[in-house]
Amino acid sequence: MAKEHVRKKKPIGKMVVAGIFSIALYTVLLLKQDMVTEYFSRGGVLYALLPIAAAFLFSFAHGSFTGSFWTVLGVEAKKKKEVK
Amino acid sequence: MHDVVAAATNFIDLNWMNITYLFLVGFVGGLVSGFIGSGGAFVLTPGMMSLGVPGLVAVASNMCHKFPKALIGSLKRAKYGQVDVKLGLVMGASAEAGVLYGAHIQEGIKKAFGDAGSNLYVSVAFVVVLGIVGTFVLRDALKSHKSGNANEKEKVTKLARWVQSINIPGTMVYFKSLNAKVSVLKTLPLGFATGMLAATIAVGGFIGVPALIYVLGAPSLMGSATELVIAFVMGLGGSFKYAMHGLVDIRLAMIILAGSLFGIQLGAIGTTYVKPFMIKLVMGLIMVIVLFSRGLMIPVYLAQLNLIQPLGEGTVKILSTTSFIIMILALLVGAGIVLNAIWKGLRAEKLQNSAEGALEHGKI
């Protein structure tokens, strides 16, 4: 039985889009440090949601980028070869 | 509440060196976390403090980086079938209660004994916990390795079997990682202890993961992966609490996250290339090395509290610096082992793929 060498397409597009999004977020964070710090450290229940929401946003964008980054580089989980 | 914040808050100025340093430490911390389910906070918090960040802000900012990191890490490891979400959430709930109680104790000690008292408490707890648990885990890992049955399914400890056998009607829940029904009541003290330790000395995972493995009987891979769910729950609750007091420096948290998200994915991938005992080995090694790091600081705090003769400034500097270096070493050792495993594993796969390809062509 000929084994098919299925070449998985590398998620380069996804990596680039997520990368742009991630870089944009970090740029805003660092360029607008003072304003961000001021609002994010005001305290109280409503303002406390700001850092939490920001953390989720960054993790969504950057998590996506880093995940596809490693895949594009070919660093992936070990493929389990089932011998039944 | 706000005057406390005003006094405590001191958000440092960021420069490229700080940013690079935080990114790199985040990366290494994430790498280790992705692999053993724990291992960032104990180096990140002092790491931030050495940049001049006040202790509370460091702890708060670390928490705000921890929960998104744990989320991404557990999502990745869930893809490999290693996460027991139910168990993670159940223990996460009691861990959260533990965090709140632990923070309360920490505040009490600080009020009664000041910073030095706090630091002494943290260091002694570190040495005791890491000493006992770390040695046990390391010995277990070496035993599996030496006995040569590293490939065999991990044996569930006697303690875990006893725990699993306790039947309290009305509280039994099936957990897939344990492959058994366990009383939810059994998870309560373990989760609570994890949370309490995380809040007081920032080492929840070093109790949580061994507890999952040795007391509840989860396999190493699932224990370390499920711990990430617990870390997520604890981190989210803790972050919110600190954010309400305006203590989170979102810049620090996100910069560390930038590095740790690269690392944690890599660490998660690493777990698929190693035999289960390696998780225990890396965890045990790091714990034992860090215990020496913390141990060196104990005389410093004892002297500050006038419990022993005062130490010269030079001595204090040497002890602090050595302690910090040893801590970095612990992380680097862990990271090195993980990276090596990934490197070897990827190369072996490539070789195997090209060998198979060659065979295929030969068959024509």
Image (spheres, coloured by chain):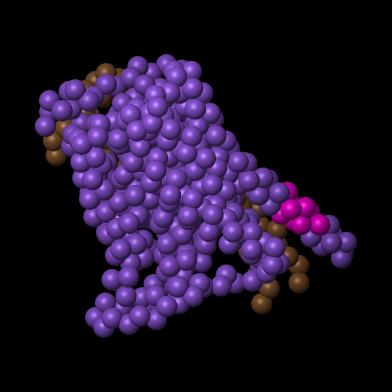
Chain colours: A brown, B purple
Q: Quadrant of residue B46?
A: top left
In the depicted structure, whether residue B155 falls above or below residue B350: below
Q: Is residue A39 visible?
A: no
Corner quadrant of residue A45: top left
Taking the image as shown, residue A37 lies to the left or right of residue B36, namely left
| Depth order, front residue of B330/A56 | B330
Is residue B360 something that shows in the picture? yes
> What residue sits 35% from the left and 16% below the top?
B13
Quadrant of the rendering where the C terminus of chain B is positioned: bottom right
- Main secondary structure of the magenta stretch: helix
**Front position in the image: B347 or B319:** B319
Q: Quarter of the image containing the N terminus of chain B? A: top left
Q: Does residue B10 appear to the left or right of B327 in the view shown?
A: left
| Residue at x 63%, y 46% (from the top left corner) | B337
Q: Please tell me which residue lies in front, B78 or B292.
A: B292
Magenta residues, start to end:
B346-355
On the image, the x and y values in percent for residue B96 come to 26, 53
Q: Residue at x 13, y 35 (%)?
A: A44
Residue B159 x %, y %: 45, 73
**Magenta region includes residue B52:** no
In the rendered structure, the answer to whether residue B191 lies left or right of residue A3 reads left
Q: Is residue B350 above or below residue B356?
A: above
Q: Position of residue A52 (x, y in %)?
A: 27, 40
Residue at 26% x, 77% y: name it: B171
Q: Residue furthest front?
A: B309
Name the side, left or right, on which B160 lies relative to B112: right
